[in-house]
Image (spheres, rainbow, N blue to C red):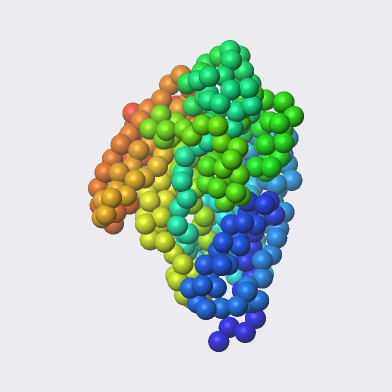
Amino acid sequence: MQTKPFRIGTRGSPLALAQAAETRSRLMEAHGLPEEMFEVVVLSTKGDRITDRALSEIGGKGLFTEELEQQLLSGELDFAVHSSKDMPTWLPEGLEISAYLPREDFRDAVVGRTAPSLTALPDRAIVGSASLRRQALIRRMRPDIEVIVFRGSVETRLRKLNEGQVDATLLALAGLKRLGREDVVTELLDPTEFPPAPAQGAICIESRIGDHRVLDLLEGINHKPTYDAVSCERAFLEVLDGSCRTPIAGYTILDGDHLQFSGLILTPDGTREHAVSIDGLRGDAVKLGKQAGETVRTAAGPGFFASWS
């Protein structure tokens, strides 16, 4: 019987702490355990410390997970809570994504200062975003807009916006909802026109492969529909060598035992793109995601992304 607290690893941003707290609450409810059976361990990651450059310039998604994963592998943590869209496609040997919490709304939200929507922004407006996907989609929609790198926590980006550094910024609606900041949203973007990042809106939990004590605990909160949907999207990314260096979008809609996946790859300037849509059984989620990835990769040809060969 477990006598010492489970150690939950997380980053220290308000959003990351909210996600860790939600995970802890769900585990307490699922297993009838008191709060003292869970210790939240806050770690600073390289991605948190370096905020003046685009992630693509300093190493990509793993910058938000490396320190947490090192302590998972050493046994200092029992499991770690992440925003799923921050997870690298390939995890360190010995680790796996064991569970997903129920997914929040995966849409992108505009927070406008000088206009409420992207289409209403004045000519040559400045929009802040660190995401290559968002940058490419903005340029596709409004080639006249200047897009600048805009990093930091949700609160930091909202402060920069209010200071007048940009005319608008884009944030994940899920994060704003988890922080209770939906009030700042001025436009919600239609995913058919402005598709989200794969896995956006989902919280995942990473643990050691074969640690049955932890796996049994996490199984009690794993949300299977989210698991299937995000597994499809991550399989799409895997085929495309998806990282913060490549503008890739994709989302899955579930309908009973069926799923429909829509994916998109763009050049960073938003002038060229290849889209794919595929549907099938939820049980084939990974296979369908990989098939979608192969389809757009073949259509795009070698060299569409600089990382391809």
Question: Where residue 213 sits: x, y (%)?
Answer: 51, 77
Q: Is residue 172 left or right of residue 53?
A: left
Inspect this view and state whether residue 110 appears. Answer: no
Q: Residue 28, located in which quarter of the rendered image?
A: bottom right
Could you tell me which residue is drawn at 48 percent across and 59 percent down? Answer: 101
The one nearer the camera, 129 or 89, is 129
Residue 39 at x, y percent in the picture: 66, 70
Residue at x-position 47% and y-position 50%: 104
Q: Is residue 277 above or below residue 230?
A: above
- Give left or right: position of 251 versus 161: left
Residue at position x 53%, y 19% from top? 120
In the image, residue 129 sits, relative to residue 290, either above or below, namely: above
In the rendered view of the protein, which quadrant contains the N terminus? bottom right
The quarter of the displayed image where residue 170 is located: top right
Point out residue 116 in the picture as x, y percentages from the top left corner.
Answer: 56, 26
Residue 256 in sight in this render: yes
Seen at 53% across and 42% down, the residue is 173
